[in-house]
Image (cartoon, rainbow, N blue to C red):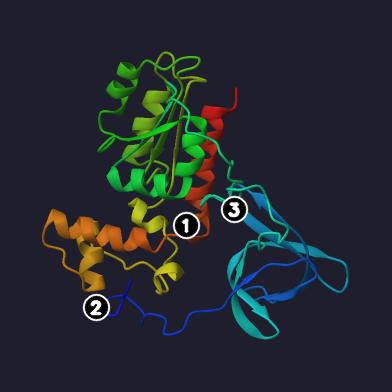
Amino acid sequence: MSYQNWGPQDLSAPAKTQLPEVPVERGMVLEEVQSGWVGAVTRVEKSGGMHVVALEDRRGKSRSFRLGFGFLLDGQPIRLMPPAPKKTAPAAGAGRTASGSVRVAGQRAQVAKASRIWVEGKHDAELVEKVWGDDLRVEGIVVEPLHGIDDLAAAVADFGPGPGRRLGVLVDHLVADSKESRIADAVMASPGAAGNVLIVGHPYVDVWQAIRPAVLGIERWPVIPRGTDWKTGILMAFGWPHSTKEDIGLGWQKLLGAVRSYADLEASLLGRVEEVIDFLTVP
């Protein structure tokens, strides 16, 4: 994917070089650039849907950081990646899914359960499918787009949630005192919702923003003026075609193509999706 045609509005120039991707190893000495913390890797674990690494300094104190950009190895910037697969040959088909989970070798997709994940639109559904699709097929959970949540209360009533028929809803821009938060509160106060419906959300205007800017070679997402359709404004800032629905769809496909795994998404989305999956799959 090329970003050479992006426009200059609100964007820094695309990165001209790609940082080396280095799998984390126990004992590796790293510097975390933002804090200046220097330490040796003592452990790597998955927490809240993301990988974190613990660095122990020379005084025996330890701090944890999220894997990814922002580390120096021997004074050189790197992108710190999850541990490399062990060289001892695992069972055929074993490995990691895009969400970081252990791939279940030879596992067929389950028949879809009654429980569902609802997301606001097609783009949300495609992003969840790309990163968590393998996991969801093993669990038999289907993701369905709502095309907006203005009628969420009626849709939940029609769904009829209950034991064995749970509903997880992922909402864009779910922040305090927003329209979305008021809709969510009303739904959760409705009969049958308690214990059977979970509504979570991320703070972004649109799920596009859940892609980490560094993955796209930019410092931050452009700021779109009020009164301008957000997606149209983003494509304009990138210098991409933006006049039709087809243009918006093609622009999204470029962005989605940059996402390879959970490491390319913001933690505020990762945690919420993992929370929904746990709610639907844990008895």
The answer to whether mark 2 and mark 3 are in CB contact below 8 A is no
Residue 222 picture location, percent across and down: 32, 68
Say if 205 sits above or below 30 in the image.
Answer: above
Which residue lies at the image location 45% right of the left edge and 70% below the top edge? 214
Residue identifier under label 1? 265
Closer to us: 101 or 42: 101
Q: Counting residues from the N terminus, which is met first, the one under dot 2 or under dot 3?
A: 2
Amino acid type at circle 1 is Leu
Residue identifier under label 3? 50
Q: Secondary structure at mark 2?
A: loop
Q: Counting residues from the N terminus, which is met first, the one under dot 1 or under dot 2?
A: 2
Label placed on residue 142: none
Residue neighbourhood size for the residue with mark 3, other residues' Cα within 10 Å, grouped as few (<14), some (14–19), many (≥20):
many
Amino acid type at circle 2 is Gly
The answer to whether mark 1 and mark 3 are in CB contact below 8 A is no
Residue identifier under label 2? 7
Is residue 121 left or right of 229 when viewed as pictured? right
